[in-house]
Amino acid sequence: MIYTVTLNPALDKEYHVAELLSNTVLRAASVKVDFGGKGFNIARMITALGSQCAALGFIGGHTGQVLREGLESTGIPTDFVRVSEETRTNISIVNDKDSAYYKVNEAGPQVSEPEVEELLHKVEGLVQPDDWWVLAGSLPRGVPADIYARLIALIRRGGAWAVLDSSGEAFRLGCAAEPFLVKPNLEEIAQITDLDVGDAAGIHRAINSVHKLGVKNIILSAGGGMSICSDGLRVWSGQPPKIEEKNPTGAGDAMLGAVVDQLSRGTTLPEAYRWGLAAGSAAAALPGTGMPTRAQVQALIEQVVISEE
Ligand SMILES: Nc1ncnc2c1ncn2[C@@H]1O[C@H](COP(=O)(O)OP(=O)(O)OP(=O)(O)O)[C@@H](O)[C@H]1O
Ligand SMILES: O=P(O)(O)OC[C@@]1(O)O[C@H](CO)[C@@H](O)[C@@H]1O
């Protein structure tokens, strides 16, 4: 079984406007709504690939209810901690004139200490040996920065596999709790290592530094650019397929979802990485925070170029 934990979910709204002008009322030509937040996207990707995946996390208010119903209607079982404040809504605006996109993320609700304890208790009660747990996204207000580290400790103690994708201090502390796999992008790895990742040498230094924090496997994504996968002994670089980008929001989640789906089926890391690159690119070619179908991912697999360094 695969579980995802999304502490700060979001109803993602994408507006298309003919031209992004200031000091005027913009009329949206179209609106797309997705059940987002990194872990929810990962759950949607894993489910689309045919594996069983349950979604956990904090949800609140009407927006939380919309997310719950949306996920459940796509066949994803949920087991949430309900919080008293409203779940956030995040906005993408796509300027049709030049296809540039602008993304605004809310901070999210204030979460109380008992709500945090309820989540930890829930996870502790569910962990079974050899299950996969994917923890992803930012923290809402009130959640301590060591939450991922504490969750990873619980998951590892229960004999399950912990996978992490976050940012800032929560990500750095989580890495030190020795997860099996992390998937930073360039900005996130620079943040957690305090290193300049402007060239290949800097990127390799940053990857080594994340291994030294305690992480076993690292997949570094870089949008349409060359990505790196390292298990600490072997390093692969991967060129994603060329696609016509629509909205790359969630591409990293599609990538991580596909990697975890493959690993949970017993696939090797480089083969899982290949699926991840194809899934990320398939997602970047979709509008909004769209997750591709299995067929859309498979259509790109052959175009992924992976080489061992
Ligand atoms: N423009 C693009 N062209 C081809 N592939 C892309 C493009 N953008 C993203 N991808 C694919 O998606 C993967 C993840 O992308 P990216 O590095 O943007 O993730 P991310 O920053 O974690 O995204 P998010 O946080 O929105 O989920 C890349 O490794 C690549 O396979
Ligand atoms: O604010 P966070 O938690 O870092 O990111 C949230 C978010 O931008 O990430 C997903 C794409 O990866 C979106 O569904 C969502 O809006």
Image (spheres, grey):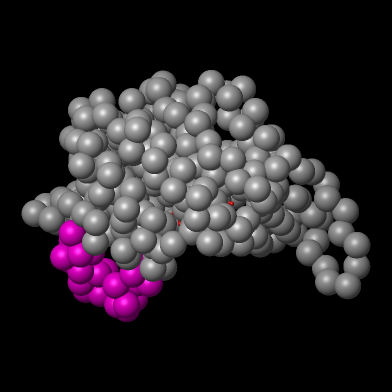
**Is residue 237 at all visible to an observer of this figure?**
no
Q: Is residue 76 above or below residue 309?
A: above
Q: Identify the image quadrant of the C terminus.
A: bottom left
Quarter-of-image position of residue 34: top right
Residue 138 lies within the magenta run: no
Residue 274: image location, x then y, percent: 29, 40
**Is residue 125 at all visible to an observer of this figure?**
yes
- Which residue is found at the position 25% from the left and 74% from the top? 202
The majority secondary structure of the magenta stretch comes to: helix
- Which residue is found at the position 35% from the left and 31% from the top? 126
Hey, which residue is sitting farthest right in the picture? 25
Left or right position of 141 against 144? right
Hey, which residue is sitting farthest left in the picture? 233
Pick the front one: 142 or 169: 142
- Which residue is found at the position 18% from the left and 59% from the top? 214
Residue 8: image location, x then y, percent: 54, 51
Q: Is residue 266 above or below residue 33?
A: above
Residue 263: image location, x then y, percent: 25, 33
The magenta stretch is: 189-214
Pick the front one: 41 or 134: 134
Residue 197 lies within the magenta run: yes
Left or right position of 277 against 10? left
- Which residue is found at the position 31% from the left and 63% from the top? 173
Q: Identify the image quadrant of the N terminus.
A: top left
Pick the front one: 136 or 294: 136
Residue 29: image location, x then y, percent: 83, 47
Q: Is residue 271 above or below residue 197?
A: above
Left or right position of 72 against 25? left
Hey, which residue is sitting farthest front in the picture? 114
